Image (cartoon, grey):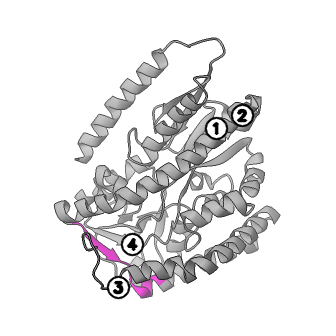
């Protein structure tokens, strides 16, 4: 699908969806009407569709008692304005990535993804069973919001480049759309990190305002049309090995809800988290093949030299954050890094070794990968 067609259909679909939802009469006086703003173009596969699915799931699970109307990027607030909207009551909910809001506190980045940090499953383990959620709650308390994991983009691509990049010194002077801690990482190699919402990346690549850009991966890159202005897609996405998408909720509003509705929201978020993650797992390879075969995209792996340089830079970013941070910052890093060590121990021995083994040459049914 051409990018222009995708964006046109998205706008039309968003207008129709918004109009029909807003025009629908309340079922009964007991229905609670909430708004969810999100940072994604309307109908964007994965994250955008995931936001709408989450709203629909909450509505269904609540038996219609809690009705959520979604507003895509720019429909009610700017794409990067979700946190402010939830804080000031413009919307009761926001669906986005926490690292969009590091201006409020740098450690918000750690709850989305950490370069060379934890994979999607490891991050979920930390949040659910390793104390990560309690620390996230403590951080968010100062903003009057609550964040719940509500989606997962899995290991992302490193990004689209207009020209090949083979050595660390080629990062010098590049303008790269790469937010969060990953952006700080590439700055260590001499690049400039640029924060742009997804809907503005294509134009920036096309005009040369940025030389390279990462967003999520093939599932989203294909409809966004990045292949029309850049032909080199690099991996692995060491800057975001597992991106946790959050549902932000105005905490005061959340606590006003009956307990069963609170639990319905939490359960819907957990379902949405797994649903989005496995959908990306399945569809990424298909979209990658379409980009390669039909659009001539070259998928390249970062060189060993670049990976070591990026890993070293990532370590420096984390250490500097730890040394300069307040008590909460250090406690978050202590918890995160301890959990990373715990999960890495067995994954390296078992799952990583299995994936390596699966690449060996031996007879096996099905297409060769």
Label whose residue precedes the other's in the sequence (1 or 3):
1
Residue holding disc 4 = 235
**Magenta highlight range:** 297-307
The residue most toward the right is 327
Q: What numbered label is drawn on residue 265? A: 1
Q: CA distance from mark 3 to mark 2?
A: 51 Å
Question: What's the mark number on residue 254?
Answer: 2
Magenta stretch contains residue 245: no
- For label 4, the SS is strand
Q: Residues within 10 Å of mark 1 (few under 14, many from 20)?
A: many
Q: CA distance from mark 1 to mark 3?
A: 44 Å
Q: Nearer the viewer, residue 70 or 362?
A: 362
Labels 2 and 1 touching (C-beta < 8 A): yes
Q: Residues within 10 Å of mark 3 (few under 14, many from 20)?
A: few
Is residue 164 visible to us here? yes
Tag 4 or tag 3, which sits nearer the N-term? Answer: 4
Closer to the chain start, of discs 3 and 2, is 2
Q: Is residue 40 above or below residue 288?
A: above
Q: Position of residue 59 (x, y in %)?
A: 56, 29
């Amino acid at each position: 699908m051409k990018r222009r067609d995708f964006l046109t259909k998205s706008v039309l679909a968003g207008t129709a969806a918004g109009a029909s939802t807003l025009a629908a009469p309340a079922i009964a006086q007991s229905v609670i009407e909430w708004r969810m703003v999100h940072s994604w173009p309307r109908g964007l596969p994965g994250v955008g569709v995931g936001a709408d699915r989450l709203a629909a799931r909450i509505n269904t699970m609540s038996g219609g008692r809690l009705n959520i109307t979604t507003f895509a990027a720019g429909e009610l607030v700017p794409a990067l304005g979700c946190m402010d909207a939830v804080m000031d009551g413009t919307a009761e909910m926001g669906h986005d990535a926490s690292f969009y809001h590091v201006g409020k506190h740098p450690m918000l980045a750690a709850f989305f993804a950490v370069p060379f940090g934890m994979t999607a499953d490891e991050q979920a383990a930390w949040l659910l069973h390793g104390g990560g959620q309690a620390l996230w709650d403590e951080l968010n308390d100062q903003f009057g919001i609550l964040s719940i994991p509500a989606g997962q983009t899995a290991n992302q691509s490193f990004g689209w480049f207009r020209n090949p990049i083979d050595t660390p010194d080629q990062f010098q002077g590049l303008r790269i759309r790469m937010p969060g801690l990953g952006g700080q990482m590439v700055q260590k190699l001499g690049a400039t990190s640029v924060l742009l919402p997804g809907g503005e990346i294509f134009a920036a690549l096309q005009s040369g305002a940025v030389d390279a850009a990462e967003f999520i991966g093939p599932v989203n890159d294909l409809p966004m049309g990045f292949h029309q202005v850049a032909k080199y897609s690099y991996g692995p996405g060491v800057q975001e090995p597992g991106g946790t998408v959050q549902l932000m909720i105005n905490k005061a509003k959340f606590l006003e809800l009956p307990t069963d509705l609170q639990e319905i929201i939490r359960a819907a978020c957990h379902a949405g988290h797994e649903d989005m993650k496995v959908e990306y797992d399945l569809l990424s390879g298909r979209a990658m093949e379409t980009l390669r075969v039909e659009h001539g995209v070259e998928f390249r792996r970062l060189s060993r030299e670049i990976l070591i340089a990026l890993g070293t830079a990532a370590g420096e970013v984390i250490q500097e954050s730890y040394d300069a941070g307040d008590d909460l910052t250090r406690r978050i890093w202590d918890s995160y890094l301890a959990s990373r060590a715990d999960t890495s121990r067995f994954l390296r021995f078992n799952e990583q070794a299995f994936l390596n083994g699966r690449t060996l040459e031996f007879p096996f049914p099905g297409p060769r990968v």
